[in-house]
Image (cartoon, grey):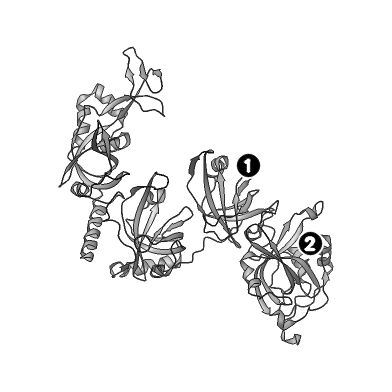
Amino acid sequence: MNRRNHPSLSCGAIPSIIGNGLYNETPILQVLGYKNLQGDNNDRYRILISDGKYSYAYGMLATQLNHLIADGKLENFTIIRVKKFVVNKVATKATTGKEQKKIIILLDVEPVVPGSEVGEKIGNPQTLNDGGEVAEEAATNSKPAPLGNMNNYNGSKSAPVNNGGYGHSAEKSDIVTHPIVSLTPYQNKWTVKVRVTNKSDIRTWSNSRGEGKLFSLDMMDETGEIRATAFNAECDKFYHMIEIGKVYYISQAQLKAANKQYTSIKNDYEMTFSQNTTVIACHDDTSSIPSIQFNFVPIVQLTSLEKDSIVDVIGVVKSANDVRVIVSKTTNKELRMREVQMVDSSNTEVNLTLWGKMGEEFDASSQPVVALKGVKLSDFGGRSLGTVSSTVVQINPDMSEAHKLRGWFDNGGSSSAVSSISTSRVAGTGGGGSYKTFGEAKLENLGNNDKPDYYNVKAMVAMINKERALYMACPTDECNKKVIDQNNGLYRCEKCQREFQDFKWRMMLSVNIADATEQQWVTCFQETAEALLGKSADVIGRLKDTDNNEFQKIFEEATFKWYIFRLRVKMEMYNDENRLKTNVYEVKEINYKEHNERLIREMKEMAASE
């Protein structure tokens, strides 16, 4: 072998790496062997590395570099350039009573010369132990020679260099930190310095084993990302403390293999917060901790991706439908959703479904640019997108892609012809929440299915039955049953089997509403009744007894006005007779700008389908 054709090894670099934990250059080392450390859910490779003067058996290849082993690029004697690394301390049974074992984790490696071409071990390297005193002593006593192209090589006595945040010590802090990529369930003590990129809403569950609640958060540092989940007491403790975008020190959480079915986070492990978990806000320099990174896919390319793919997408929201309610087939619970139509500079449009609180609070009036990380691709209605619990949604983000898209849309993109990869669901039948007239709902037999149907209607209030609008109810929070006035100053609730000195007013309105095709008697319960009348049940109840004129005026002011009603219809048996029961799920005043935009959109869709 002609060594003059190969770069020189960074002689004496390994003890300096171990001693400092930081390194201001990219050392050139040689691979002398590797060992597969099979874990619960993935392979980890321990690497025997040499700098020509010292060899060290406690190198660890980051899991994202496992492909180098599989592809045969790190065979024995391969010369590598280490572009990024970190030194981590790990306690093991073998190190009980001693200083913790030091592991050099290789985060970014470039094979320089294949091992088959080198063909032999370079030099006669002395074996270092597991990073204890021998390694530190070797680092102190070593006087490394010039390192080929490494003109600024520093020995162990040099001050640590800030290498993009890698290494033990957090900037301007005594807290010892570990990179996310180095975490495994076999470590006892660690602290990470991370930026929170996403936080879910609090979710509850109830099953045969009991009830509970949880929230999850996604975090990242310069080496990777990881998800954490907090249950019950920890959910209450940390939910309001942790904010998206801020940096925290987190320690003493439990690590376990990640369930890839429920997360798109690229990490083999995930955290669970415990009673010992600590979360401390970081007030030091956080510039080394990156913000969320996107890998945007143009909308036009979504048709070539597999169903259920998790992708990042950016687009301008051209229009949005109203919030609607559907019933989950699995849980039979009512879910809220909003569909919006997104376009990008490929002149392609796609439907995006925003679920839950995200959909309820979304404002499309300004046609914002929306960046989505981790949104799910569906084949429902051609191709469409839907948020999941881990999806990150940024409105008008300060990034070059968003600025370019805004400029394209405002300078002609908004009026350019687009092709949609999604089938419109607005005109569909059934219970989704589409707009219909009473005549259309009757023709489609809505309410005659096994489950309730939902739809929206623009209708006028024609009549309100005032006589039975109010009733005296049980004053306890969990009970709204009607109470009996015993005419002795006490009110009895048969459900609670108790007598009370007071009661609360509740409303249940019977309202006749009409559009151009039909009229329908509907029922408004407490919340929708108060929204329709604009007054609380308590205020209306007191007026009933004290000021009949004001009481009548409240009902008169709500009559002959137009509203948007969201109706729930279901055929039910009453006195051996089938009757269509219609309840008002939501009522709101008409926003004519949004209403007219919806009508224009529907007319265009109808014209395009002819």
Q: Is residue 372 above or below residue 490?
A: below
Specify whether residue 281 is in view. Answer: no
Q: Is residue 549 above or below residue 147?
A: above
Where, quadrant-wise, is the N terminus in this rendering?
bottom right
Which amino acid does the dot numbered 1 rest on? Gln
Determine whether label 1 and label 2 are within 8 Å by CB.
Answer: no
Q: Residue 553 placed where, x, y %?
A: 20, 31
Q: Residue at x 35, y 22 (%)?
A: 503
Find the residue positioned furthest to the front. 576
Which amino acid does the dot numbered 2 rest on? Gly
Marker disc for residue 131: 2
Q: Residue 69 placed where, x, y %?
A: 66, 71
Circle 2 SS class:
loop
Marker disc for residue 275: 1
Where, quadrant-wise, is the C terminus in this rendering?
bottom left
Label whose residue precedes the other's in the sequence (1 or 2): 2
Q: Would residue 565 appear left or right of 398 to someone viewing this image?
A: left
Q: Residue 493 placed where, x, y %?
A: 37, 21
Please tell me which residue lies in front, 307 or 358. Answer: 307
Q: Would residue 72 appear left or right of 361 to someone viewing this image?
A: right
Specify whether residue 389 is in view. Answer: yes
Q: Residue at x 22, y 32 (%)?
A: 554
Q: Residue 37 placed where, x, y %?
A: 70, 62
Q: Residues within 10 Å of mark 1 (few under 14, many from 20)?
A: few
Q: Would residue 137 appear left or right of 85 to someone viewing this image?
A: right
